[in-house]
Image: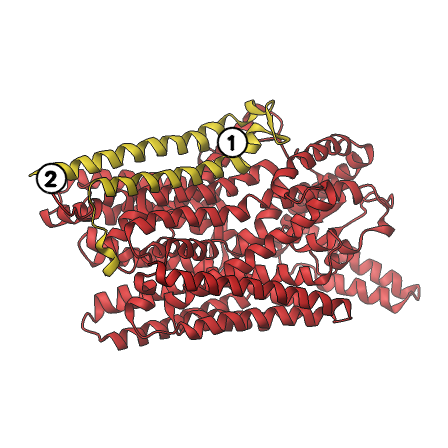
Chain colours: A yellow, B red
Amino acid sequence: MQRRRKQQDYWRRNLRMTALLLAIWFVVTFVVSYFARDLANITLLGLPLGFYMAAQGAPVIYVLIIWWYARYMNHLDREYGVNDRDAED
Amino acid sequence: MADYTVPLRRYYAYYTAGFFIFIGTLAVLERHGMPPRWIGYSFLFLTIFLYATIGVLARTASVSEYYVAGRRVPAVFNGMATGADWMSSASFMGLAGTLYLSGYQGLAYVMGWTGGYVLVALLLAPYLRRFGQYTIPDFLAARYGGNLARLVGVFATVLASFVYVVAQIYGVGLITSRFVGLQFEVGVFVGLAGILVCSFLGGMRAVTWTQVAQYAILIVAYLVPVTILSYQVTGIPVPQLTYGQVLQTVQLLEERIFDDPSELDARRLFRERADGYYDRILTLPDSLEEERRSLSGRIDDLKSSNAQMRDVVSLERQRRDLPKSSEEARSHWDGLMRQAAQRGAAPDHHLTPYPGKGEAVNDDARLNFLSLVFCLMVGTAALPHVLMRYYTTPSVREARNSVFWSLLFILALYLTAPAYAAFAKYEVYTSLVGSSMAQLPVWVNSWGKIGMVSIEDINGDGILQLAELSLNPDVILLATPEIAGLPYVISGLVAAGALAAALSTADGLLLTIASALAHDVYYKIFRPNASTQWRLVVSKSLLLVVAVLAASVASQKPATILFMVAWAFSLAGSAFFPALILGIFWKRATPRGAVSGMLIGLLVTIYYMVRVHFDAIPWLGIHGFGMEPWLGIQSTAAGVWGVAAGFLTIIVVSLFDRPPSQETQNFVESVRYPEFDHW
């Protein structure tokens, strides 16, 4: 039974992190783009903010999201003593 | 682990160094008078020879090696291979041009093709790796208990991947014919050979290691020309950071050029021409008859006035080339009308999001932008040839890391593409527009000869107006070395890069199609007792058949093929995404729900695409079924409806169905939770 609780715990923490990161992904992609016309007055590296975000900002944030998720989950695996035994498949 | 990645890194370091030495040698030889054609040949044959060597060295007779590279590919190398697998000839050649032509609107591709990896990383890759079989239909069959789900999966895999692979082989034909001077059809079959040497003997294992090699070539080829151009224009060799400044200059130039009186005049003339075609289409079939009569009249006049025979012949040819029927005339003139109308339309500012006059137009552009981004992302997270790559890592941990590396390697290209567009625009506005027709730069003429650049002095003032210039999107990337005045060896390098991009993607796709047919249909459904050896024979023969089939379709030069690639994303997204996501995150999803959801998602997408994009399918004898798009969404973003319909169907049907068996629920748990060591 303890194993079951541990699994649920692990899964809940995974879901919470996934939801948080997806929310960031959503805001960066859809909310920022939705307001791209209104962000035209702010410039970054010579580009209006809306353009900058679509061309560079969002893609860089995507990489960071993926990096953070891998890091978080790999730590979580270690914390929960996961045996990643697929290696021997 | 570390024991075998160290020699790997060393090999690829030697390999990259060797490639640079090769480029250097060719550069020296060119200075000593080596003709361009030979440089083209050297690049073509050396790179294909390289891939062939890796392909032969990595040959294998083991099923696990053949389908998933023995699950021994370290995260970094899998990332590179995924990058090459992912970046197709459309990314390599087309993206810069799309950004040139549509400015901000083109960024939908940059965002969509990178943001999809967030979905892959968070929602799919680790779970698929934990499941650890061979194909995506494998997963569907295991989760949704049965061969029906598997078959639908195979159908969608083949549908989405085949169009895509044809486009890659088509790209190979274009590159080889343009740079090496081979005939297009010959180029297609040279490309086919290049693809087969990588995948035939060694399957996924060989494809993976050639893709790593191809990534190195394609990224070097992409970065070198624009870096040099950036240095020439701004003095800083980091195009990703400098193009913002350049675009500010472009913005100023646009404000001056767009409203220039001669520019307005040229655009008016193009619009008048479009109106002329419109009238002719309305008055069909009389207008066609009229056209023929007037040409005949002129021919008779010329003949009676003893004019030059050459003029008579040219007019006779014009008469012969007139459309044969009203139908033909309609589509021919419709094309010309659209072309003229496009050139006559007011151009949009590069930096302005959702351009156009009026709030309704802006909102429409925004809606289409956002839905295209959505479709490209969901499609990225559902294309089987990408997802399959995450079966090849040694562990779940490595799969997670590997998505990070994939996107990092992919970004190197996507962050650079907007710079190509910016520098090309800068060049066109400063040294092309407003210059005399007689003194255009050399690259305009050399690319004009093969129809990539077309110029028409419609107002006859002997000066080039912006409206009078039209560029094929691919030319932006291909002509950059010449724009920057670089030696031909750099053009050869770009061609080698484009070739690497097309070949690597084609390899991955072919292998995906062949495994879906050989593993999922033949082995899992028809002959579960087939021996290992026989399975590989079937797999390799199917690979050969599919490759030849794709090459023969590509050699027909299907015109709509590039357009159809955008559809592959919507198709894959609506077929796979809902079923995969709900399969992992919702235990209640049932087999009936999933199968109906996949089919309905796919059908909605196809229905929408076909009815919005076409008005008639002549070979089926159907006419006039075109419809108004829903909410104004274009056919390239049809997946928006398909994905929504897929999710909805799976949820509704599953809720009316009996809950899935305990076995299935246990399966979902085994995909979700890792094994715990001590508890």
Measured as percent of width and height from the top left, residue B143 is found at 20, 51
Q: Quadrant of the rendered structure where residue A9 is?
A: top left
Mark toward the viewer: 2 or 1: 2
Measured as percent of width and height from the top left, residue B217 is found at 55, 60
Rendered-image quadrant of the N terminus of chain B: bottom left
Rendered-image quadrant of the C terminus of chain B: top left
Which amino acid is tagged 2? Answer: Arg
Q: Which mark is residue A4?
A: 2
Disc 2 to disc 1: CB gap under 8 Å? no
Q: Is residue B576 visible?
A: no
Instruction: Give the residue at the far right of this rendering.
Output: B305
Question: Mark 2 and mark 1: span between their CA atoms?
Answer: 47 Å
Q: How many marks?
A: 2
Q: Which mark is residue B591?
A: none
Q: Secondary structure at mark 1?
A: helix
Frontmost residue, B587 versus B490: B490
Question: Image check: A75 left or right of B437?
Answer: left
Q: Which residue: 37% across, 68% down?
A: B203
Q: Which mark is residue B366?
A: 1
Instruction: Give the residue at the far left of this rendering.
Output: A1
Query: Which chain hosts label 1?
Result: B
B471 to B344, vertically: above or below = below
Q: Secondary structure at mark 2?
A: helix
Question: Image check: B71 left or right of B505?
Answer: left
Which amino acid is tagged 1? Answer: Arg
Q: Which residue: 68% across, 34% down?
A: B245
Measured as percent of width and height from the top left, residue B321 is found at 70, 62
Q: Residues within 10 Å of mark 2 (few under 14, many from 20)?
A: few
Query: Which chain hosts label 2?
Result: A
Q: Residues within 10 Å of mark 1 (few under 14, many from 20)?
A: many
Q: Quadrant of the rendered structure where residue B258 is?
A: top right
Q: Quadrant of the rendered structure where residue B452 is?
A: bottom right
